[in-house]
Image (cartoon, rainbow, N blue to C red):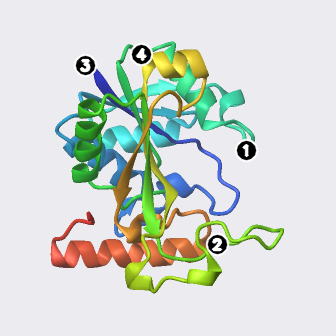
């Protein structure tokens, strides 16, 4: 099966200007996701979809084998969906399984990507999301408990928790993207990741927290996985 990775990288960002190429731990933010994709043994080709020539140049400087897809400006607005980028990509690149990786989750490891693909193929899933286990008690706006019974409140060590989508990456069969126009559909699987990967870089505070985690990984030569 032809398995390719897609990292969407648009030029604009409201919360953090030029976020995708802003330096974190000495490298552009997008470096970490692209690097994980190239180091994953089960990824055959790695693509970036971008509307920015600057992003295209910087990423190619780091990864000469990277393939660039020119994204139309209408697919790079604040309102453009990731699905619209995936569909644009699908019309230009042949693949069986698409691994869509978010650069705002730089704590992704090649281990997680390969493990997820292995499970995906073994269980014959049609699509897959990544998640972290959250051991918190959730309530709805109408004051109803969502994931536990208050009359038998479990101890934390006995509580299985709830899986929370962390947005790190998604696996989608071409047939599902074609029929559903959505990253998730058919038989959906979940790949569980380390709790630390729950952070997506959307605000400056997220940036500082993730940078400290990456610095610790570099200094200890470790990778986040459960």
Q: In the picture, residue 144 is in which quadrant?
A: bottom right
Tell me what residue is drawn at x 58 percent, y 41 percent: 10
Helix, strand or loop at mark 1: loop
- What is the CA distance from the residue labelled 4 to the residue labelled 2? 41 Å
- What is the CA distance from the residue labelled 2 to the residue labelled 1? 30 Å
Tell me what residue is drawn at x 42 percent, y 38 percent: 57
- What is the CA distance from the residue labelled 4 to the residue labelled 1? 24 Å
Of label 4 and label 1, which has the lower sequence position? 1
Q: Position of residue 19 (x, y in %)?
A: 55, 57
4 or 2: mark nearer the eye = 2
Tell me what residue is drawn at x 56 percent, y 37 percent: 52
Residue under pointer 4: 93
Tell me what residue is drawn at x 62 percent, y 63 percent: 16
Q: Are marks 2 and 1 in contact (CB under 8 Å)?
A: no
Please say if 27 is above or below 144.
above
Residue under pointer 3: 1
| Within-10-Å neighbours for mark 3: few <14, some 14–19, many 20+ | few
Helix, strand or loop at mark 2: loop
- What is the CA distance from the residue labelled 2 to the residue labelled 3? 40 Å
Of label 1 and label 3, which has the lower sequence position? 3
Q: Are marks 2 and 3 in contact (CB under 8 Å)?
A: no
Q: Position of residue 108 (x, y in %)?
A: 34, 56
Please say if 155 is above or below 48.
below
| Within-10-Å neighbours for mark 4: few <14, some 14–19, many 20+ | few
Of label 2 and label 1, which has the lower sequence position? 1
Helix, strand or loop at mark 3: loop
């Amino acid at each position: 099966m032809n398995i390719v990775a897609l990292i969407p990288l648009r030029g604009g960002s409201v919360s953090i200007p030029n976020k995708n190429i802003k330096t974190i731990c000495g490298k552009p933010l997008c470096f970490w996701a692209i690097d994980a994709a190239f180091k994953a043994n089960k990824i055959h080709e790695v693509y970036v979809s971008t509307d920015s020539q600057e992003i295209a140049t910087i990423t190619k400087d780091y990864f000469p084998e990277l393939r660039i897809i020119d994204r139309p400006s209408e697919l790079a607005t604040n309102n453009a969906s990731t699905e619209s980028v995936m569909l644009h990509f699908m019309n230009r690149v042949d693949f069986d399984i698409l691994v869509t990786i978010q650069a705002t989750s730089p704590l992704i490891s090649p281990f997680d990507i390969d493990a997820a693909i292995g499970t995906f193929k073994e269980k014959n899933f049609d699509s897959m999301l990544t998640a972290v286990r959250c051991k918190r008690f959730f309530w709805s706006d109408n004051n109803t408990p969502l994931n536990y019974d208050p009359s038998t409140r479990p101890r934390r060590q006995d509580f299985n928790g709830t899986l929370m989508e962390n947005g790190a990456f998604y696996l989608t069969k071409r047939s599902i993207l074609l029929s559903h126009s959505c990253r998730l559909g058919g038989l959906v699987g979940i790949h569980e990741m380390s709790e630390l990967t729950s952070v997506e870089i959307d605000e400056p505070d997220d940036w500082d927290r993730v940078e400290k985690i990456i610095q610790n990984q570099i200094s200890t030569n470790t990778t986040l996985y459960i």
